[in-house]
Amino acid sequence: MVYISHRMEEVWQLANRVTVFRDGTWIGTEILGNVSTTDIVRMMVGRQIVDLYQHEPRTPGKVLLEVRDLAGSATGPVSFEVNAGEVVSMSGLVGSGRTEVARLLFGADPRTQGSVRIDGRTSNPVDPTAAIADGIGMVTEDRKNSGTVSRAFG
């Protein structure tokens, strides 16, 4: 089977060998047991990636996003806070709940419990339009199916 993907976790789960192309040129083929993710990324981008940015100690600012016991039909409950100046990543394998939490925050899926506060005020959007009005945005991981408008506007 030939499987084409840019998602590294899928490559590691499904493949025995990986072939890397860059700018339309074959770079190499490796047995996954003989290389690391760092090796594959280096093949993909053409250079060693050490740090993407300079890490500096920072003191978090005030709480801007407070999520308490948020749950929906497919995930939860989850609680977390995001402070001013922080960049927070939700990560996990497919089916872990990260996408579902984002959809709950964005009003794309109904909440079954929990509360969300943005800069001290309650946010309970029932749809994405209401979420946007509350200052919440979402960039979908599935750009092709969920991130495009498929019909023409006239």
Image: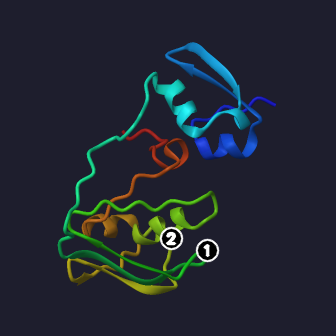
Query: In front: 28, or 91?
Result: 28
Mark 1 sits on what residue? 74
Q: What residue type is labelled 2?
A: Asp
Q: Which mark is residue 109?
A: 2
Residue 85, compared with residue 77, is above or below; it is above
Question: Is residue 136 rendered to the left or right of residue 43?
Answer: left
Q: Distance between the residues labelled 2 and 1?
A: 10 Å
> Which sits in the foreground, 79 or 70?
79
Front position in the image: 110 or 49: 49
Please indicate whether residue 17 sits to the left or right of residue 141 in the image: right
Image quarter where the N terminus lies is top right
Q: What element carries label 1?
A: loop
Badge 2 vs badge 1, beta-carbon distance below 8 Å: yes
Q: Earlier in the sequence, mark 2 or mark 1?
A: 1
Q: Where is residue 36 in the image (x, y as percent from the top left)?
A: 61, 38
Q: Residue at x 74, y 42 (%)?
A: 14
Q: Where is residue 34 in the image (x, y as percent from the top left)?
A: 70, 33
Q: Residue at x 23, y 54 (%)?
A: 56
In the displayed orientation, state which residue is furthest to the top.
Answer: 25
Name the front one of labels 2 and 1: 1
Q: In the image, what residue occupies the spot 27% across and 51% down?
A: 55
Answer few, some or many: residues within 10 Å of disc 2's Cα (few below 14, many 20 plus, some between 14 and 19): some
Residue type, mark 1 in image: Ala
Quarter that holds the C terminus? top left
Residue 70 drawn at (x, y percent): 46, 81
Circle 2: element type: loop
Q: Is residue 82 left or right of residue 99?
A: left
